[in-house]
Each structure stands twice: as structure tokens, then as C-alpha cells.
Image (cartoon, rainbow, N blue to C red):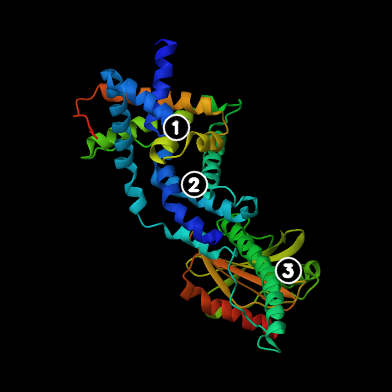
Amino acid sequence: MTKQMKIDDWALGAYADGELSGDAAAEIEALLRDDPEAQLGVAELKRQKTALKQAYDPVLAETIPPVIKTVVARSRLGRWRQATRGVMLIGALAAAVALVVHAVDLRELTSSQAGNMASAVRSAHAVYGSEIRHPVEVAADQRDHLMTWLSKRLGQPVNAPDLVQHGYQLVGGRLLSLGEKPAAYFMYENARKQRMSLYIMTNPEHRDTAFRMEEAGGIMTCYWLDGPLGYALAGEMTRAEMEPIAHAVYEALDRT
Amino acid sequence: MSFKTELVTHIPFLRRFARALTGDQAVADDLVQDCIERALRKHELYDPERPMRAWLYTILRNLHVSGRRSELRRGSNIGLEEIPRGADAVPPRQEDRLALGDIEEAVRRLPLVQREVLLLVVLEDMSYRDVAEITGVPIGTVMSRLSRARSFLRQEFDGDKEPRLRRVK
């Protein structure tokens, strides 16, 4: 193949791809009229394009996988969270606007902290939930030691709630971290050997949020901030199965 | 249009490109998901003066290349040019769509650097300039890779006896 031929190939390609200006395109068109081989070349390029479009265009009509939609939907970007426990409707319009703006800022802060917690519990659950030999550092038979130790590290009284009524027994716990802060991790297991993880970390802002639930990769998480602590649950279960457990955890911890 | 709203409009096209690039639906959708997550996380890096589409394709393309690199890294450094075809390919399917099967198989057999340029230009209708930016190479390199990819496809199809599709304008 000579160099000249190659340049022609490029020019034909650029012409077929609509890359040429009016003058340059007209020049190629003029050349094409007397060049059956080049005409075949252009037809071949069009044929390739048609074949590629026919092969892959059906993807455009497919439903977007829910998991991808979820990624967009749960992103905090450009979306005001529903107020959980907000203070609204006070004073004149200007004051109200100022308040709303302020409240949104705070919500963004706390929800990002809660969101971090949700992803932390999901990772912890994925890693330790499938661990056979050493799922926990301290087993449930040393429960008192476990609670004392983790409470001391978190600087807050921490307790693993009793979830026997919901079919889950405490397996034990371990010390983990979230960012640079210590976090308590408790593992529960039911009779079918299905595991559930509970993550407890400090909530220095002391701001509360409502329950938030999300599902990713087959793992359901529920998380909330409550006073000095934040909580996140994770397990392979449905929303309907997790909801009563989350409420039980909330109530048990509220009483301590 | 908000960032998110516009982002969503590009998802079908990102999926089409990813499908053609990887030849596998699950791998492609993982790639698109990673791309969208990254775009949302890094949205402040997006320059609203420039087309979002090219920015998203750059993210997806880079994720694909780095994924392929780490997959192939086995003791020695491997350059982009050396990445062979087909480790991510699925075997050809025995389906009734013979002609389409042929083109998909031919695309899979292209070296990655040619495959991505061909798909961006011909399937995604991107300009050479955008493709140069997305793939991080000069326009001349884009044209050379494109030309080689097209020659390869032409050779692949010279052998078959399928009636040629002709469009006369």
C-alpha cells in the first residue's frame, strides 16, 4: 500500500464521517464521480456503519438496569432531602428562606455522614458476613467485656440490642473504624445461618435523621443518626424484613 | 437542565458504547454503573461549558482501560498498545442474526485502541476532535487507528458471501 493510497483512505473516511468542510467535501465529491473504486470504498464505510448501528442500537431501547437508576437516585447531588425533623414556617418570608437554606446545609452534612456509615456497614457486612473462621474479634460469650471495650473506645455507652425476638442471636463484635474514628461492629446470625451486621459510630454533630433504607448488591441497609450515636444495619434481606428489626434496634437503644 | 437530569439522558448511549466495547452485557453495565458513580462523585470537575457527553465517555473509557490493565498486569508492565483483544470477549453466539453476529465478532477481534476509536466515531457519531480528547491521543492517531480498524473490518467481510448492504442516495 503506497502512502498516497493511505492518505486517500483517510480522506475518504473523513468525508464519510462528515469531518470535512464544505470545500474539502466538494473536492472529494468531484473526485468520487470518476473513481468507481473510491465509490465502493465509501459504500463499504456506510455498510460498516449500518452494520454497527444494527448490531448495537437495540441497546438504546432497553430498560436501564434498576441498579444504575438507583445510583443516580440515591446521589445527594442537586436534590433536597425530605426534612426529617425540621423547623419551618417561622417569621417573615425572608427569614423563612434563610432558615431553609441553613437547614438544607445541615441536612447535607448529616446525610453525608449517614451515607458514609451505610457504605461502611455494607462493606463490613460483605467482608465479615461471609467469614467462617474469625467473623468477630470478641464472641458473644464475652458480651460484657465486648460492650465495655467498645464503649470505652467510642467514648459512649454502646450496647448490642437483643434481637432474639426477631430470630437473630448475637455472634460477637469487633472494633472497626469509620474515617479516623473508632466504630463498633456487631454481628448477628439467625437459625438459617443468615447474618446481619450492626455498625455503631459516634455522631459528634448530635443531629438526628430519620431511617433511610437502600439496597445495593443484594445487601439491604438501614441507617440513622440518633443523638450521640449513628447506627447502620446491613443484611441480605428485603425492606419488609429489615424494617421491624431496625425499629427494634432503635427502641432498644433508645432505652439504654 | 440539572446535572443529574442531563446525566440520565446519556445513559442509553453509554450503555450502547460499553456493550460494543466489552461484548458482554453484565461487564458493560458494571462499567456504566462505575462511570455514573464516578461522574456523580466528581461532578465538580465537570466543566459546564463543554459537552457532558464527551466528559462521560472519557470517564467510561478510562475506567475500561484501567480495568483491562489491572486485569492483564502479570508481573510485567503492559502498554495500552499491547493489550490483546478478546480476554473480555464472549464466544460467538450461534444465532439467526448471522450478519450481525459477524460484525460483533469482528469488533471483538479488533485491538482495543482501534475498537474504541471505531466505535466512538462510527457507532457514537463523535467528531475526531472529541475522540482525540476522550482517548488522549492526537487527531492523526485517531485517523490512523480508525483507518486500520476499517481495513480490518473490510478484510473480515471480503471473505463472507453475505449480500452487501448498499445504500444509494
- Exactly how many numbered labels are in the figure? 3
Expressed as whole percent of the image width and height from the top left, the position of residue B14 reads: 45, 47
The residue lying toward the viewer, choosing from B124 and B59, is B124
The numbered mark at residue A42 is none
Q: Which mark identifies residue A146?
A: 3
Pointer 1 residue: A21
Query: SS of the residue at dot 3?
Result: helix
Mark 2: secondary structure: helix
Quick check: marks 1 and 2 in contact, CB under 8 Å?
no
Kindly indicate the quadrant of the structure image that contains residue A134: bottom right
Do discs 2 and 3 belong to a common subunit? no
Query: How many residues crowd mark 1 within 10 Å: few (<14), some (14–19), many (20+)?
Result: few
Q: Quadrant of residue B124?
A: top left
Residue displayed at 39% across by 36% down:
B122
Nearer mark to the viewer, of 2 and 3: 2
Q: Which residue is situated farthest in the top direction here?
A: A2
Q: Is residue B150 shown to the viewer in this render?
A: no
Q: Amino acid at mark 2?
A: Leu
Disc 1 to disc 3, how far (Cα)? 74 Å
Residue closer to the observer: B51 or A25: A25
Left or right, B69 with respect to B95, comes to right
Q: Is residue A5 left or right of residue A135?
A: left
Q: Which residue is mark 2?
A: B31
Query: Looking at the picture, how far across and down is residue A26, in whole percent?
Result: 37, 28
- Which of the two discs, 1 and 3, labels the residue nearer the N terminus? 1
Residue nearest the viewer, comparing A24 with A180: A24
Kind of residue at badge 1: Ser
Q: Are circles 1 and 3 on residues that touch, CB within 8 Å?
A: no
| Residue that appears at 55% across and 59% down | B3
Identity, as a three-letter code, of the amino acid under mark 3: Leu
Q: Give the class, few, some or many, for how many residues have Cα within 10 Å of label 2's Cα (few <14, many ≥20).
A: many
Q: Label 2 to label 3, Cα distance in Å?
A: 41 Å
